[in-house]
Amino acid sequence: SRPSGSLWRPPEKATGVGNSAPVAPDASNGSSGRTGSPEASEIRGSVVRLARTLAGSKFLQRQLVRGTVAAVDTILSEIEEDVAQLMCDSYGNYLCSAAFQACSVWQRQRMLERLAPNVPSIACDKRGTHALQVLIGLLCTSEEHEQLIRAVKDHVIPLCMDAHGTHVIQRLLFCLPPSQTDWIYRPVMKSLVEMAHHPSGLCVLKKCIAQSATMERHQDALLMKLAEHSLDLVQSPYGNYAVQHAIEEWGGEKCAPIVRSLEGRIMQLSIQKFSSNVVEKLLRSAPLELRRCVVDELIESDKMSVLVNSNYGHFVVKQALQIADEAQVRLLLKAIRSSTTQLANRRLKGTWEKVMNIGSERLGERTLQCNHRSSLDGQERGPNIKI
């Protein structure tokens, strides 16, 4: 029974050696073997060594959450001395991520000062980039933002082009207030074409496009650059995604300059693997008057036989038949029929018959060429690069 007048506590569970859990193997170093809440003196001078081992890193992470104030302060102060190297260590990077969350603002500022000269190399390290992104997400004062900006601003493009650094720049775009991101947009504008042709650079460019929707000054500058180089970008395996993303984020009305920059080359772009995706997107999103111009360009071209013989033209024509007015549908069907009569490829001929059925159905005509219909959505263009 519980003794009256005193605080009752349940009996402690025996562990075999005393009443506490065993220490991480690398954490012993002559200590007394207690780990529940070790004294600061037991871990002093051993933090960096422990942080580089699996058991030691986990042990120290637990102490940051459950340890005494003195033990936590000891861990943080010793991490601070070697923070740049630990952030790139296989196990130390996890401890650094936990430490950034456990420390106060002034402790975080001191760590930031310590690692500032090494920020570009940490950002490009496959382990360091994760710890650095955690740190970026925790920065909350203008002083911290300014410290980090000074460390990164001269390395924006190299980081954008790096497989790991690109995530740091994207994290900065996401976490920093819009008023503090001009230093990222300026070099991106200057190197837009180079970035659009690069898989890692493209990711940053797409982030800039998305976030500039609320910043008209940056949006207009990006749009002008994209329109200026649109013919090159839409034919690129990566650049076409930049143009498509702009159309998706800003809308066809805003992207009218891009459509106009491609006028006169719609047929050429419709038969290519990457640019045909952009033409489809334009047909879906462009203002009505511009869509009519694009369809008219297909109808009036003397290269319809080239389009019919391509592997990608039918995707564009299918979209055109779905959005064109009835007069344009009739003219487009007439142009296609006159070119498919001489088509030798049976597979392509069957594909074009299904495409023409879409136009015929819009006109209310019955088609007898096929006994059954199947959607074109399941057809593949071949492997494409997904970003």
Image (tube, grey):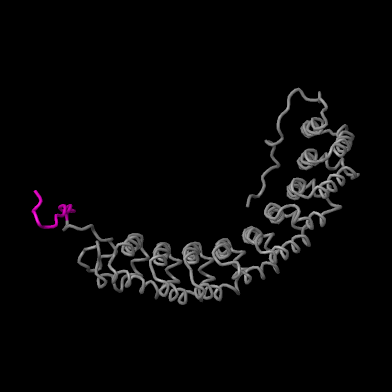
Quadrant for residue 53, please give it: bottom left
Residue 380 in the image: state x and y as whole percent.
69, 39
Q: Is residue 92 left or right of residue 151?
A: left
Residue furthest to the front: 5
Look at the image and tell me whether residue 40 can be seen.
yes
Residue 157 in the image: state x and y as whole percent.
63, 68
Above or below, comparing residue 332 to residue 19 in the picture: above
* Number of disc labels: 0
Is 13 inside the magenta-drawn segment?
yes
Dominant SS type (magenta): loop
Quadrant for residue 47, please give it: bottom left
Quadrant for residue 170, please give it: bottom right
Q: Is residue 193 left or right of residue 173?
A: right
Q: Is residue 180 left or right of residue 143?
A: right
Residue 276 in the image: state x and y as whole percent.
76, 47
Q: Residue at x 41, y 65 (%)?
A: 101
Residue 214 in the image: state x and y as whole percent.
65, 61
Magenta span: 1-16
Q: Residue at x 54, y 66 (%)?
A: 124
Q: Residue at x 43, y 76 (%)?
A: 110
Q: Nearer the viewer, residue 238 or 175?
A: 175
Is 81 inside the magenta-drawn segment?
no
Q: Is residue 348 left or right of residue 42?
A: right
Above or below, comparing residue 81 to residue 89 in the picture: below
Q: Nearer the viewer, residue 360 or 195?
A: 360
Look at the image and tell me whether residue 349 can be seen.
no
